[in-house]
């Protein structure tokens, strides 16, 4: 299997622009997680899905962030409008079943100018 | 609220040395604890997962222990190699599939 796939790998945008990050989980995995990593705060869970349904979005920082999982093989994380403080590395991870090992994608490095 | 702390934040050792990385957590009501490795500019790679009912897990030169009652875990690396240089992250999973991460220990193994 190719592992968790994320795109783009790098994104540079200007404040106020919409940003869409994409994730393809490992085939057969039924849980999907979006994380954000910064130097100051470390890795933080933003939202996770189980069987395509959002289970917990308490980590989403504010209404500018939204996430969707229209099917078992695709998810998006959208930031609209983007702000410089959103600059971070965003990771997607997937797992098979509850409380199993999470497999991480390579991340998307986002820079908002 | 669960908090995970990793000490030290950075560690530099000569090749061949055995070393221990530490992880502590504030809420002992966990389902499992995981150790990950992160290389610069890369994602996380799962190293070991210890279920709450287990005391330790081993994989090759790595051994992770868990003392749930005291809120501690250690990752032991035997005969360290330069290729072990990376950041090691500890994460605990509570009752909701949510992983709470520590900020990691950056390990450098010098040839």
Image: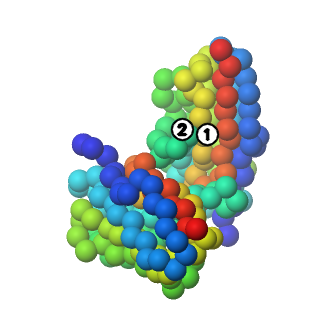
User: Mark 2 vs mark 1: which is more N-terminal?
Assistant: 2
Residue beneath the point at 43% across and 48% down? A106
Residue drawn at point x = 62 percent, y = 16 percent:
B79
Which labelled disc corresponds to residue B87?
A: 1
The percent position of residue A24, horizontal first and vertical second, equals 29, 58
Q: Residues within 10 Å of mark 1 (few under 14, many from 20)?
A: many
Q: Can the viewer see residue A6?
A: yes
**Does B8 sit above or below residue B29?**
above
Question: Which quadrant would residue A96 be assigned to in this image?
Answer: bottom left
Q: Is residue B40 left or right of residue A75?
A: right
Q: Inspect this view and state whether residue A97 appears.
A: no
Same subunit, labels 2 and 1: the answer reads yes
Residue beneath the point at 48% across and 28% down: B59
In the picture shown, does residue B95 fall above or below B44? Answer: below
Classify residue B56 by image quadrant.
Answer: top right
The reply, left or right, for residue B65 in relation to residue B14 is: left
Q: Is residue A113 shown above or below A38?
A: below
């Amino acid at each position: 299997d190719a592992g968790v796939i994320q795109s783009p790998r790098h994104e540079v945008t200007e404040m106020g622009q919409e940003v869409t990050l994409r994730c393809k989980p490992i085939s057969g995995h039924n849980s999907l997680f979006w994380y954000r990593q910064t130097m100051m705060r470390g890795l933080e869970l933003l939202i996770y899905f189980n069987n395509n349904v959002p289970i917990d979005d308490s980590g989403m920082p504010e209404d500018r962030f939204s996430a969707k999982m229209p099917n078992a093989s695709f998810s998006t994380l959208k930031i609209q409008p983007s702000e410089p403080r959103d600059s971070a590395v965003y990771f997607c991870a997937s797992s098979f079943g509850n409380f199993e090992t999470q497999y991480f994608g390579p991340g998307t490095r986002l820079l908002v100018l | 609220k669960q908090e995970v702390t990793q000490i030290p934040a950075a560690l530099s050792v000569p090749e061949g040395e055995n070393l221990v990385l530490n992880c502590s957590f504030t809420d002992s009501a966990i389902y499992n604890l995981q150790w990950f490795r992160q290389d610069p500019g890369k994602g996380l790679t799962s190293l070991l997962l210890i279920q709450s009912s287990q005391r330790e897990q081993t994989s090759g030169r790595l051994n992770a222990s868990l003392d749930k009652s005291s809120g501690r875990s250690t990752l032991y690396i035997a005969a360290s190699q330069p290729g072990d240089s990376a950041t090691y992250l500890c994460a605990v999973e509570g009752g909701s599939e949510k992983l709470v991460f520590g900020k990691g220990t950056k390990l450098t193994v010098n040839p």
